[in-house]
Image (cartoon, grey):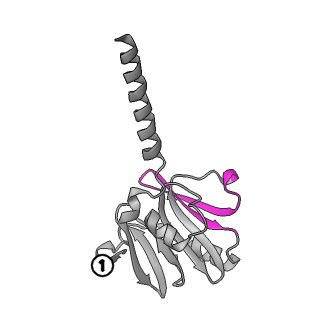
């Protein structure tokens, strides 16, 4: 009987570790389903219903809000980051950027330019691949910001596909 109990305890611990591994390593954040796209001043505006941030971007990007979206856009590579709120890729010229939950360690991601902001006590980070043209990088970094309540007009925006 003691052997059976030890076996069951080991089996239960294995299942707990396995479940913990899969749930803690989600590639896309649950916040990604709350993304909203709209048009603003001739650019694409990405904002989020749950976190009041906005990111302006150019119209030639393709966006991913789920892992299947990502695989459709970027068939060659796996996502570089976890807890992705938004993935964007363009091929004119080819580069990508991510918006992720959490603060990134720049030393671990030297191939990306990184800007973090804190919203409601949460770190949100923009990571732009360094092969982006400098003008594009400056634009994206400058237009990644927290939305003030008086600037936010989320009720008039369209939900992302």
Q: Main secondary structure of the magenta part?
A: strand
Left or right: residue 86 versus residue 128 is left
**Residue 155: x, y in percent?**
28, 74
Q: Residue at x 43, y 24 (%)?
A: 10
Residue identified by numbered label 1: 156
Q: Is residue 84 above or below residue 38?
A: above
* In-front residue for pair 121/92: 92
Left or right: residue 154 versus residue 142 is left
**Residue 113: x, y in percent?**
66, 64
Helix, strand or loop under label 1: helix
| Region rendered in magenta | 107-130
Residue 23 belongs to the span the image colors magenta: no
Q: Residue at x 54, y 84 (%)?
A: 60
Q: Is residue 139 above or below residue 31?
A: below
* In-front residue for pair 118/31: 31
Residue 129 belongs to the span the image colors magenta: yes
Which part of the image, by quadrant, shows the C terminus? bottom left
Q: Is residue 43 above or below residue 79?
A: below
| Total numbered badges shown on the rendered structure | 1
Which part of the image, by quadrant, shows the N terminus? top left
* In-front residue for pair 74/8: 8
Q: Is residue 85 above or below residue 137?
A: above
């Amino acid at each position: 009987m003691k052997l059976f109990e030890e076996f069951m305890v080991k089996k239960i611990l294995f299942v707990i570790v396995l479940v913990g591994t899969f749930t803690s390593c989600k590639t896309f954040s649950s916040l990604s389903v709350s993304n909203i796209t709209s048009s603003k001043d001739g650019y694409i505006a990405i904002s989020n219903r749950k976190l009041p941030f906005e990111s302006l971007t150019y119209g030639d990007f393709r966006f991913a809000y789920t892992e299947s979206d990502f695989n459709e856009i970027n068939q060659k590579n796996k996502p570089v980051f976890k807890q992705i709120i938004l993935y964007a890729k363009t091929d004119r010229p080819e580069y990508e950027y991510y918006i992720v939950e959490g603060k990134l360690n720049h030393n671990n991601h030297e191939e990306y330019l990184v800007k973090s902001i804190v919203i409601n006590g949460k770190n949100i980070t923009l990571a732009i691949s360094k092969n982006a043209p400098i003008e594009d990088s400056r634009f994206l970094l400058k237009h990644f910001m927290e939305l003030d309540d008086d600037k936010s007009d989320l009720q008039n925006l369209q939900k992302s596909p």
